[in-house]
Amino acid sequence: MRKYIIKRLLLSVLILVLVTFLIYGLMRLLPTSYIEAIARQKSQQPGSRSYEEWMELLTVSYGFDKGIVEGYLRWAKEAIRLNFGDSWFYTVPVTEKFHSVIWTSFTMSAISMFFEIIIAIPLGIIAATHQYQRADNIISVIAIAGISLPTFFFASLLKLVFSVKLGWFDLYGMIGRNYEQLSTFGKFLDKAHHMVLPIVTLVVISIGSLMRYTRTNMLEVLNADYIRTARAKGLDEHKVIYHHAFRNTLIPLVTIIGGSLPGLFSGAQITETLYGIQGIGLTSFNAMVAGDIPFSMFYLTFMAVLTLLGNLIADVLYAVVDPRVRIS
Amino acid sequence: MEDEKKVLEEENNNSKTQYSLNDDRRVKVLSPGRLVAKRFFRNRIAVIGMVILLFMFAFSFLGGVLSPYNEDQFFYRTDELRKAYATVTENVQYRYNELSPEFNAVIQAQALNANNQGKDSFTYRGVTYTITQDGENLFSVYLDGNKIGYAYQDIVNTLDGSTPSVEYQYAVLAAYCNNLTSFEFEGVTYEVDEVGMIMVNGETVGSVGKYIVSASSVDVNLTQNFKEKLLVAIENGQDQFVFTDESGLTAEYDLTFDPSKNSWSVLQYTSTTVFDTYSAPSKEHWFGTDGKGMDMLTRLMYGGRVSLVIGFIVEIISTVLGVIMGGISGYFGGWVDNLIMRIVDVFYCVPSMPLIIILGAAMDHMHVESQLRMLYLMLILGFLGWPGMARMIRGLILSLREQEFMTATEATGLSVNRRIFKHLVPNVIPQLIVSMTMGLGGTIITEATLSFLGLGVKFPFASWGNIINDVNNTFVLTHYWFIWIPAGVLLLLTVLAFNLVGDGLRDAFDPKMKR
């Protein structure tokens, strides 16, 4: 087991190196005029460094004066020490900006994941146990509708109904107008209030796939021989489903949920942008649109790490949770 | 059609003639394709999806042809606008004309002061000046019997706008302020009427009065006739007046008095042609017009075309790449498989959405042309989509390779070509079709999201995503539902239909599925 994990880890590191090299290469391939134009634009802001200084900074941190491999090595050397340079757009060190926004995204994603799990799994089970009946059809259509909903459209609809027509929530932002006058608890409530619509959006958008996944796996388990045995020996249906079948469905579920845990840190770009939630999604979106190369490099690397971590966790969990899987 | 007839005939025969129990003709034989179709059409939800898709294709591809408007046709409407036309200021302050340099600003002030107090002389620094009241709001200042200047309130204008000489002005003023109807200057007889028009032999050469009329914009040339009528209207205290110029154009004007500036503003009603933006649904525009004054329904049709075409092309690119890579990897195995799968791993880790956003921003910055941009978008999306497809194909081929029928093809000595294309590929195709159908929905959402963010399809091309983009303007979100809700509903329905059909196809292709 340990050997397997170590092997996977080493492979992941190799892949990460290749991915970051690819990303670095792509950034280098961006036309020089684009980078120069951004540097020039930056230098025209009041109190900014001069154009030469910006270009020098870039050259130093990205090795533009060197070959692509040498430049990458220089960048990687700094990146290993978690030094990703200063953000052009936010004018603070990239990691500092990252620290200040990541927990908002994490909280939001974690809460919506919690709701997603407690809603999707029971519904998935109901759909599977009532296959091709009305309940299954309704749940399946809802699941597919959830998958098909474009985030931005759904979020706009929610805003129109709940913010504009009913006036229950603010249209935009994380805190209310009188946030500073509130007590600590009031501040907490205010923030929670502003999180409602984004979380509803996230839950509705992401609920479908987990629901379908649960249904498919539950159906597979329900067709298994041991379920037939359980029924044959006269157990009541409730016990068959929740004791025998559900436990076995948990194997793929735990694997996929474990694998999506790192994703909690990746932020929800569209949702955050639409609701003005200052999380990593909105922060990185603004940075990327503004051509903030240090931040973009960092964000792409961070996302790659999260994906790798997710795969790794899923694979390891699969081996750990399922007693039938033995790694040789 | 032929097949269907045959089946019908068979069915009829079945009911009429009795076959023995083990007769083959008792069993209705359907080809695998027809079996799939039968199972698919039995699935009501999938059929609904199919119908929606057919509608969308008709809407997008036929709609554009049937619509009376073009994709980039603008519409206009005329708006009644009150535009500032001229201003009339009443002069209530004395102005000065000097005849000799002694009449400087200090003396002017002293003279005014003395005049206000009703004195007819004043002394400044030991020099005595005398004042004569030459008429209403007109007085002259003398030094040692010589006239050094005069002060006046009524302003003398010439027809051509040039500044008249100081002497001429005085002659006019002397006549006007004393209500004389004519005066003589340098041998010419001028006539002055009650509104201050100066005429020579019945021809207007200028005007005099305390009102200053000036045009509000440079392109407006105020005629003397207009000024006259306007002044009459102001004197009468009207707040509206109608004027017909020489060419017969009649316009209505509003007069508003501003006491703080002691002036009247003259506002002209003009009809201006503007883009017909955000107009509500009507008979001409069933879904209204958008923020640029284009017909919404037509934009939606062309937008659907763009969304669907992009979806298909992206899906074809990534499928072709994925099938080639996954096929090679799965069929040959060994180090080739290992190498390709590591490449897939690497590409799988590249975060596609952020990458496209960065590239989109770069393209924005460099003003890449809309059409070229669309091409790049398709290439990028297609290229980033292949790793998932390759993984699926590889897994499929790996499992198929181990199955008995493949061993059988090998045992019967079929050629490699025949084994791959006759036996392996047909077994991959169902899965391929299912994942392409489902993938299409995803691709359309991705494209729409990018266009929504303003980084995908750009004006002048329409896409459902960039139509909804207008919602970023809060006023549109709250007031013009018809701008963004139809596009969103179409987008949702299309993606939903692709997913439903994909689901139905998967169930239909799976022979183990029981219903």
Image (cartoon, coloured by chain):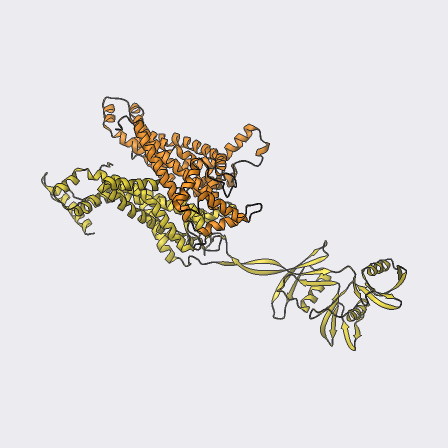
Whole-percent x, y for residue B450 in the image:
42, 46
In the displayed structure, would residue B245 be above or below residue A251? below
Tint of chain B: yellow
Q: Does the image show residue A114?
A: yes
Residue A133 in which image quadrant: top left
In the displayed structure, would residue B137 be above or below residue A319? below
Residue B158 in which image quadrant: bottom right
In the displayed structure, would residue B67 be above or below residue B357? below
Which of B421/A249 is in front?
A: B421
Which of B265/B332 is in front?
A: B332
In the displayed structure, would residue B95 be above or below residue B345? below
Which of A86/B440 is in front?
A: A86
Quarter the N terminus of chain A occupies: top left
Q: Is residue B441 left or right of residue A96?
A: left
Quarter the C terminus of chain A occupies: top left
Q: Is residue A291 left or right of residue B515?
A: right
Tint of chain A: orange
